[in-house]
Image (cartoon, rainbow, N blue to C red):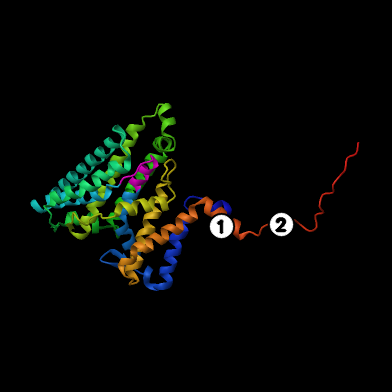
Amino acid sequence: MKALTKQRLFWPVVALLVLLLGDLIASPSFFKIELRDVHLYGNVIDILKNGAPLILIAIGMTLVIATRGIDLSVGAVVAISGALACLWISDNPDGVGTTLIAFGLALGLSLLLGVWNGWLVAALGIQPIIATLILMVAGRGIAQLISDGQIITVNSHSFEWIGSGYLFTLPGAILIALAVFVLASVLVRRSALGLLVEAVGGNPEASRLAGLRSARLTWLVYVFCALCAGIAGLMISANVHSADANHAGLFIELDAILAVVVGGTQLTGGRFSLGGSVIGALLIQTLTTTVNALGIPPESIMLFKAIVVLVVCLLLSPAFRRKFRRRRSPQAGPSAATPAPEKVEVTA
């Protein structure tokens, strides 16, 4: 059992199960799933569908944090991607071709934004938090310029699928997020890419002396993170049939960072866990769904997130667990059965 508690995913999984158990006790119908029109509906399905954008961004954020970086611009990239796609669809006839072009434009611009972040961090050596803060601030302005400060409403069945469509009775959004997770896991765990990322994040100077092209690798992870944010932006806009430059993806960068930290990846870089980040994203989305399902005022969502994240982070902390075990175990005093050592006098 002691070895099990040391596993990286143990406490995030326990926290998620405890939260789901609390939902079951508070509302026995929380896990009720219905099949209507060959589609599955229910709170669990809503968690998967609404959590897909956060899962995508958490996957990209994990690799960025593994290189000792951070990306605060993912929320802005979400807004830009959704605004550009909705603008193109609203100005052109509805059809699959129009939707594919919109996807291409939105994801292409997201890649360019990732190249910009990577250039600032890897080529110019600017601190990641400052480099991505630039796009975080400017990105909202770019999204507002694209949408002309208005909420762009679209009515396209082919575009709606990525956010609210279904495939094999499951939401298409979670299937896309699952495909990205599998692809990223294969690339970083079935090749040397994952070891290179951990080497760059664990000791950048040693990796440079070993001949690793750390700048190119750092550039790559920022591009991948922006691509994930671009796909998430398409999902969010398609789910609500509109693009809101002011509120789309607002604070999602903070949720993604929390998901990564809850999943066991340290902000100091090095070893990372994509599976842990997915569990952390599901935990945060379950919190949101729980608050809505139980009728708790939505203003308290941030407070619930903070409490749960604090508890999980404390459980993940080896120092906290050692102090907790030390307080629980009785202090061992001198045994009465053990005689005190006798003094031996030595005479010349």
Numbered circle sitting on residue 324: 1
Magenta stretch encompasses residue 63: yes
Question: Whole-percent x and y of residue 191?
Answer: 40, 36
* Residue positioned 36% across, 66% down in the render: 290
With 136 as the anchor, is 345 left or right in this view?
A: right
Disc 2 crowd, CA 10 A, few/some/many (<14, 14-19, 20+): few
Numbered circle sitting on residue 333: 2
Tell me the quarter of the image containing the N terminus.
bottom right
From mark 1 to mark 2, how far is it between C-alphas?
A: 19 Å
With 223 as the anchor, is 67 left or right in this view?
A: right
- In front of the other: 230 or 42: 230
The chief SS type of the magenta part is helix
With 330 as the anchor, is 166 left or right in this view?
A: left
Between discs 1 and 2, the one toward the N terminus:
1
Tell me the quarter of the image containing the C terminus.
top right
Q: Is residue 10 visible?
A: no
Residue type at mark 2 is: Gly
- Hey, which quadrant is residue 198 in on the image? top left
Magenta stretch encompasses residue 215: no
Contact (Cβ within 8 Å) of mark 1 with mark 2: no
- In front of the other: 289 or 205: 205
Which SS class for mark 2?
loop
* Residue positioned 34% across, 36% down in the render: 218
Question: Whole-percent x and y of residue 271?
Answer: 44, 42
Question: Whole-percent x and y of residue 47?
Answer: 33, 61
* Residue positioned 25% across, 49% down in the render: 231
Residue type at mark 1 is: Phe
User: The magenta stretch spans which residues?
Assistant: 59-71
